[in-house]
Amino acid sequence: MKEQIKKVVRERYAKIVKQESSCCGTIESSCGSSNSAHKISKRIGYSDEELKAVPEDSNLGLGCGNPVAFASLGEGEVVLDLGSGAGFDCFLAANKVGKNGRVIGVDMTPEMIEKARENAKKGNYENVEFRLGEIENLPVADNSVDVVISNCVIVLSPDKRKVFSEAFRVLKPGGRLLISDIVLLSQLPNFIKNSIEAYIGCVSGAISKNEYLREIRAAGFHDVKIINETSFAIEHITSSQTVSSIIDKFKIPPEKVKEIASSVLSLRVLGLKPGEATSIKRKRLL
């Protein structure tokens, strides 16, 4: 089942980068619309300045938050982005860490990696590199990065505990994990939980908020806390082509759709890897 999910997710994201379809509740129309992606990105926390500072083709409007905004990135730091897509957050991070810093993006979709590398060349980002790989098995050395970020990607992993364990492994002592993701306040109906289509639509793959935080702590992270959380607007759920097809397929009544949407949260979470630098990083984040 896990491999089937990965296969379908990979295929869907390959289509997205080719502008053939859309994914996740945050997409209003198609990923091919840069205007739509711009509006979505502003709504979830990106400024006009940030949107103008990176290659336009890097923003596919697939996120559910702005992890770079609360990462407090410093000059010279090494940043790893889990599920880097076309490179949007990587380029924002690169502008923060400067020429002495470095940003690594990891994505399991070859088409996304190809697009991200094109964008890096287009924007002349010499401090950014993109690696093909799965976030459950990161192609990154132990204790080698200062910060791990991710934007609405871990929700798609069928093995979230492994993702957090891998993030913990690659972080230096005192390093930090900063994530924007989707979680649940209540259980989803079984017909949605068991739907591959809903998984791709970033609904079925979500777990409860408490379980999500437990998984981060179980990986070894300390001082795990929620930076902020926001409810997902109903139009974010229903405007997704994937989710709309699920609603039609199972003939879900409008009141049930509202109930399901009200249980979906967009979350920003911080976790620290214990070590000598922890107190310094904590001061920077407070």
Image (cartoon, grey):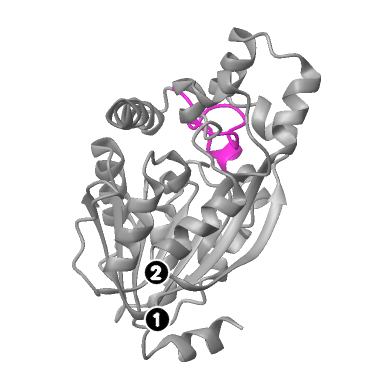
Q: Which quadrant: the C terminus? A: bottom right
149 to the left or right of 237:
left
Q: Which residue is mark 1?
A: 274
Q: Which residue is mark 2?
A: 220
Identify whether 208 is placed above or below 104: above
Identify whether 171 is placed above or below 263: below
Residue 36 magenta-highlighted: yes
The amino acid on which the numbered mark 1 sits, given as a three-letter code, is Pro
Q: Nearer the viewer, residue 226 or 190?
A: 190
Residue sitting at 48 percent across and 29 percent down?
A: 199
**What element does badge 2 sit on?**
loop
On the image, which quarter does residue 157 sit in? top left
Dot 2, crowdedness within 10 Å: few (<14), some or many (≥20)?
some
Residue sitting at 40 percent across and 48 percent down?
A: 160
**Dot 2 and dot 1 residues touching (CB under 8 Å):** yes
Q: Main secondary structure of the magenta part?
A: loop
Q: Counting residues from the N terminus, which is met first, the one under dot 2 or under dot 1?
A: 2
The amino acid on which the numbered mark 2 sits, given as a three-letter code, is Gly
Q: Which residues are magenta?
A: 21-37
Residue 24 is situated, as x and y percent measured from the top left of the image, at: 53, 34
Q: Nearer the viewer, residue 202 or 215?
A: 215
Q: Which quadrant: the N terminus? A: top left
Q: Nearer the viewer, residue 31 or 171?
A: 171
Residue sitting at 34 percent across and 62 percent down?
A: 167
Dot 1, crowdedness within 10 Å: few (<14), some or many (≥20)?
some
Residue 106 magenta-highlighted: no
**What element does badge 1 sit on?**
loop
Residue 31 is situated, as x and y percent measured from the top left of the image, at: 49, 32
Number of labels in the image equals 2
Residue 220 is situated, as x and y percent measured from the top left of the image, at: 39, 69
